[in-house]
Image (spheres, coloured by chain):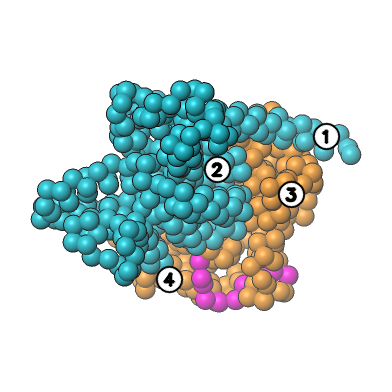
Amino acid sequence: MISIENLSFQYDEHPVLANLCLNIREPLNIIVGPNAAGKSTLLKCLFGLLPAKGKMAWKGVSFSEMTKVERMDLMVYMPQHDVGQTALTVFETVLLGKLGSLSWKVRDEDLEITLNALKELGIENLAKRYMHQLSGGQRKLVSIAQILVREPEIILIDEPTNNLDMQKQLELFTIIKEVIAEKDIMFVIVMHDLNLSCRNADSIIVLNQGGQLYDQGAPREIITKKMLRDVYGIDAYVTVDDNDVPLISPICSLGKKQKKDHYS
Amino acid sequence: MNSTTREARRIYRSLTYKKVLLIVGLSIMILVSTLVNLFVGNADLTLGETLKGLVMKADAVSNFVIWDLRMPVAFSAVFIGGALGIGGCEMQTVLRNPMASSYTLGLSSAASFGAALAIVLRISIVPGVGNLLVTLNSFVFSLTAAVLIHAFSRKKDSDRSTLILFGIALNFLFSALTQILQYVANESDLQSLVFWSFGSLTKVGWPKLWVIIIVTLLCLAYFGKNAWKLTAMALSDESAQSLGVDVQKTRRNTILVIAFLTATAVSFAGTIGFVGLVSPHIARILCGEDQRYFLVTSALVGSLLLSVASILSKTLVPGTLIPVGLVTSIIGIPFFVMLIFKKKKGYV
């Protein structure tokens, strides 16, 4: 379990997260919320890219007691923008996940882990292709393979379904669920697509504008007409399908003015 | 060994063996071009005389021509070319910009300004250096620019684009300062200033050559040691960070080392254009961006280019030595244009 107590962070006097308290304990957790709710910032604070005030701990061990290396071994972070258009092959890119143990001579173990990760995601046929020859969806899979070779306990991903078509989005979650079934890994994922989140998340964490926790729990309990009005400032139908998954059909924005009223 | 390990090894080998072959091939080509470089030149030596000179069995004049005139030029072509290739490769990597080279951040114009101060005003930064006045001055100014950039990049929010802009600003500043000196210089000083800025290998003698060899090899070793980190830098800042690389620190230190290398090369040989820009592009197309090979290949391509340019500078117009900097620029321009019109690997 990740426990977060009184986490605060501000960019140039402008608070992004304000005294956030949160426990994350399910295998697949999805953070949602409007723009500027501090979703990405929360991931970066967890990973240690941004210096935040407050307490964060994993299974009772505070992050501040861990060395940088221990923290890097514990979790990995996959940024929103993918690895870019480099002249590196897929195999080399995934191998980079083992950066800590790489030297001029590459160890057999590292090669093996790399190939296994490619096979797990079914992209071993791409091993010798250059990154700039791949489609956006393929590059995402390479990023995930790079994360898997690091064998972390926690994986933080920022908007992984950006620029993916519907099939690729669904496949991505199938892969994530396969990984969870095989290994004891916790995923914390930032998403914008609520319907996709509802279908896949074990737990949904809703952040409010101003970086405060609005609510947290199973999709069925969290996704309500009231939440959508309070947090997103929209009017929407919420129905539930046969699998008890909520479905959202947005109707209209309640406008900036009204939204402000809700906060006051 | 299980079958997965074997398969993984096979894939890895198939990726690397071509690159090793490439490095061997380039090395042979450099060897050949260096030999050719020893056989051409203004002094009318026949093939036989040159051969005799190489084994020190010719007359004193031929020996002098071979060992003290041609050999330093041939070797400094290899090592300065290599230095420029290395500098360009790492500058393009840490700035992730296809237009970057060792000169991008104003290092060479700072060197030119230092040289101009020495030539025109005879102002020395390091007192009592005599003949080395111009060299040392340009070296010190180039490093000063590097220190300014280093200090600037320590700022918390400096990133690639602010660094490049700061470098461009430095570039303009030093060019303007040099122009002021050109404006006030007398005719003969102006001539030597212009000649200095052309870039030529003939001003490098044995002692300077040794310095260049040592500095180049040291920098190569430094970057080689950080090869994987630098490979990660090619992805994106965030990706490299998430892999555990201290991006800002790596970028800062890399630039400082490049500056040292460039300052050495520029202060000894003047500005030699395009080698540092073009070599990494050729290397990237040939072997990709795995730094262990990319770095070495960039260095070798740089060596080969400058070596060939050095031969051309002696042979293009018989009896006349064209400054090698002009030759590289003239070869470089068509390539540069090609680069713009063709989609390049890595930077699309």
Task: Identify the colour of chain A in the image.
Answer: orange
x and y percentages locating residue B193 in the rendered image: 22, 49
Which quarter shows the N terminus of chain B? top right
Q: Which residues are magenta?
A: A50-59
Inspect this view and state whether residue B26 appears.
no
- Judge left or right: residue B56 versus residue B132: right
Please report the residue visible at 55 percent of the width from the left and 43 percent of the height from the top: B295
x and y percentages locating residue B319 in the rendered image: 31, 26
What is the CA distance from the residue labelled 3 to the residue labelled 1?
28 Å
- For the residue pair B166 and A199, the one nearer the viewer reads as B166
Amino acid at the residue labelled 2: Leu
Mark 1 lies on residue: B6
What is the CA distance from the residue labelled 1 to the residue labelled 4?
50 Å
For discs 4 and 3, the disc positioned in front in the rendered view: 4
Residue A11 inside the magenta-drawn segment: no
| Figure chain in cyan | B
- Judge left or right: residue A63 versus residue B327: right
Chain holding disc 2: B
Please tell me whether mark 3 sits on a helix, a strand or a loop.
helix
- Judge left or right: residue B12 versus residue B36: right
Please tell me whether mark 2 sits on a helix, a strand or a loop.
helix
Amino acid at the residue labelled 3: Ile
Q: Are marks 1 and 2 in contact (CB under 8 Å)?
A: no
* Residue A10, numbered circle: 4
Mark 2 lies on residue: B295
- For the residue pair A117 and B152, the one nearer the viewer reads as B152
